[in-house]
Image (cartoon, rainbow, N blue to C red):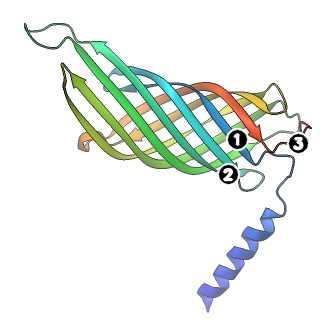
């Protein structure tokens, strides 16, 4: 009885709060751009893309996909040893996104907590090792709305991975453009 009452109350709040969603907010934000992250001491440059579906006025569901690539010269320690180490990392994470859109309409701020998996491959002289592991990202950023449908974004994330059985911390910086789908012509 208590479980069914709790379920009914939760469903009522969920569906009634959907009716309070502001219609001038976009239904979907698509972001794409440049990203930089470190992996095993190697600075990796690449791309990032995300989609945020706005469920309510301030809450959305975000999916994030990124790929970064790089190499570092290791120097020749012994003859016939590799002098470059190559690394790449791909991440796919999904989770809630909180968005704050002030009345001025020029700037938006957001934060997210995403969960998923990441894959890395580190190699030298054709010999490498790869691993796929659970990952999560905690971060946020800001958008500057320079047109009714377009914004410039800066984003900073703390990405946590667990490659090869040990935890790694990565700072990820991203810059790019956001396209707002379903936004009204006004800047509310």
Q: Earlier in the sequence, mark 2 or mark 3?
A: 2
> Where does the image place residue 162, in percent across and percent down from the top left?
32, 43
The number of numbered discs placed on residues in the rendered structure image is 3
Asked whether the beta carbons under mark 2 and mark 1 sit within 8 Å of each other, the answer is yes
Task: Judge left or right: residue 49 versus residue 29.
Answer: left
Q: Which residue is mark 1?
A: 29
> Where does the image place residue 152, in percent across and percent down from the top left?
71, 25
- Which one is closest to the eye, mark 2 or mark 1? 1
Q: Which residue is mark 3?
A: 184
SS for dot 1: strand
What residue is drawn where x is 47% and y is 43%?
92
Above or below, 75 relative to 60: above
Q: Earlier in the sequence, mark 2 or mark 1?
A: 1
Q: Earlier in the sequence, mark 3 or mark 1?
A: 1
Q: Which residue is mark 2?
A: 60
- Which one is closest to the eye, mark 2 or mark 3? 3
Q: Is 170 in front, or is 174?
A: 174
Packing grade of label 2 (10 A; few <14, some 14-19, many >=20) is many
Q: Quadrant of the C terminus?
A: top right
Above or below, 12 relative to 144: below
Q: CA distance from mark 3 to mark 1?
A: 13 Å
SS for dot 2: strand
Q: CA distance from mark 2 to mark 3?
A: 18 Å
What residue is drawn where x is 23% and y is 25%?
123
Q: Quadrant of the N terminus?
A: bottom right
- Name the quadrant containing residue 165: top left
> Where does the image place residue 146, in percent across and percent down from the top left?
81, 24
Q: CA distance from mark 2 to mark 1?
A: 10 Å
- Name the quadrant containing residue 20: bottom right
Packing grade of label 1 (10 A; few <14, some 14-19, many >=20) is many
């Amino acid at each position: 009885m208590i479980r069914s009452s709790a379920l009914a109350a939760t469903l009522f709040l969920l569906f009634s709060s959907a009716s309070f969603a502001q219609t001038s907010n976009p239904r979907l934000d698509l972001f794409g751009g440049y990203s930089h992250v470190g992996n095993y001491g190697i600075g990796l440059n690449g791309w990032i893309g995300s989609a945020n579906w706005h469920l309510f006025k301030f809450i959305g569901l975000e999916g994030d996909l990124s790929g970064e690539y790089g190499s570092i010269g290791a120097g020749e320690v012994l003859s016939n040893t590799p002098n470059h180490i190559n690394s790449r990392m791909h991440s796919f994470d999904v989770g809630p996104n909180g968005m704050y859109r002030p009345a001025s309409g020029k700037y938006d701020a957001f934060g997210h907590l995403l969960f998923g998996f990441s894959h890395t491959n580190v190699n030298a002289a054709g010999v490498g090792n790869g691993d796929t592991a659970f990952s999560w990202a905690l971060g946020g950023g800001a958008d500057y709305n320079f047109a009714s449908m377009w914004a410039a974004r800066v984003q900073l994330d703390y990405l946590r991975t667990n490659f090869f059985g040990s935890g790694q911390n990565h700072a990820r910086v991203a810059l790019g453009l956001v396209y707002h789908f379903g936004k009204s012509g006004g800047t509310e």
